[in-house]
Amino acid sequence: MLMKRLPIEGKVDFMSVRMFAFALSAVALAASVILIPMKGLNFGIDFAGGMLVEITKPEGAEIEDIRALANELELKAPNITEASGTGANAEETFVIRAALPDEDEVAADADTNADESAATDQEIDEAQRFIDALEAAYPHSDVEERDWEILRRDSVGPRVSNELLQAGITALAVSLIFMLAYIWFRFQIAFSVGAVMALLHDVILTVGVFSLLQIDFDLTTIAALLTIIGYSMNDTVVVYDRVREELRKYKKMPLKDVINLSLNKTLSRTLLTSGTTLLALISIYVLGGEVLRGFSFALIWGVVIGTYSSIFIASALLLHTGLTRDPEKLQSADEIFSKS
């Protein structure tokens, strides 16, 4: 029903504003490249290492009291924030982050050299030591109905956090390489250049926004970036398929007009897919709580920027990458294999 109400085939001249879009993207990319090393990323404990404890607010406790407790325990670089829950039974929460002692400090505390098990014990001890202190300061009046609860508890050592960061960067690089190979195999090199440039554009701008807003950058953000790559590529492939079909049909039509025609023919599908996806993601962002906020924000931004890049980057670059109208090169992989 909704599909019938949307225009089946619009007449928007997307390519007439491509130079403005290129300039806008160039400025945004340059700003991101400058901002990321200058301001840095707000790494979560997955990449920065440390401990994180999230609790519901104990009765009578204020954020200054929790900070005083953390200072009493001499936690390393403590950072305590207050957050509001979501939903009908929303509760206020405290999020406590602290760095873990370095391996040298662990070794100094122990009589033997620091090893992996010693580091792990120290991670557990730091988090447990803080929780024990909380329970002593704010004892539960009833064992069955606790006055406050531990919502989340994580600890990651420095060595593990470095390994996770390297693994995340590797995952992003490998995904981009495989996407390039897929587009090159399915279409032709002119298509693959535009697709990969669009993917790099999406990833760099997303990381730039995380640096600007200092949102937690952790493993869930890497998962969101990989999802953005997949979503953006899917959108781009739909448009590229239509471009290839229209090139076969209109052999003498100017390439600019063919791309505009293809984008307009896929516009209804793009609006519906992006719109329904955004509705779900906004719900997660609003109702999912602090833990899912960074992940859902990255996906919301990714859907918007992915839709933009598939139109104004991936498609527009076809005018500048030497796209050929050779019927043999416009064949899909399925058609090539069916003839052989």
Image (cartoon, grey):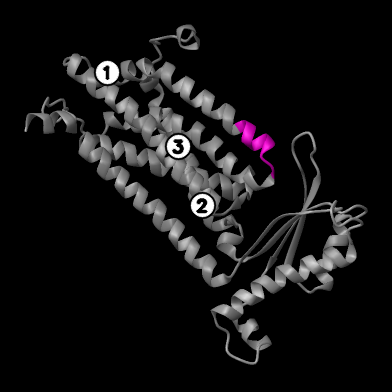
CB of mark 2 within 8 Å of CB of mark 1?
Answer: no
68, above or below 119, in the image: above
Residue neighbourhood size for the residue with mark 2, other residues' Cα within 10 Å, grouped as few (<14), some (14–19), many (≥20) = few
Residue neighbourhood size for the residue with mark 1, other residues' Cα within 10 Å, grouped as few (<14), some (14–19), many (≥20) = many
Secondary-structure class at tag 2: helix
Marked residue nearer the N-terminal end (2 or 3): 3
Quickly name the residue at label 3.
25
Name the amino acid type tagged 1.
Answer: Val
Q: Is residue 286 magenta?
A: yes
Percent from the top left, x then y, of residue 310? 39, 30
Percent from the top left, x then y, of residue 66? 84, 61
Name the image quarter holding the C terminus. Answer: top left
> In the drawing, does residue 78 fall left or right of residue 60?
left
Quickly name the residue at label 2.
34
CB of mark 1 within 8 Å of CB of mark 3?
Answer: no
User: Which residue in the rendered view is the most extreme toward the front?
Assistant: 144
Residue 31 in view:
no
Quickly name the residue at label 1.
258
Residue neighbourhood size for the residue with mark 3, other residues' Cα within 10 Å, grouped as few (<14), some (14–19), many (≥20) = some
Please state the extent of the stretch shown in magenta in the rendering: 282-289
Q: Residue at x 53, y 47 (%)?
A: 208
Name the amino acid type tagged 3.
Answer: Ser
317, above or below 67, in the image: above
Q: Residue at x 46, y 41 (%)?
A: 227
> In the drawing, does residue 240 fall left or right of residue 68?
left
Name the amino acid type tagged 2.
Answer: Ile
Marked residue nearer the N-terminal end (1 or 3): 3
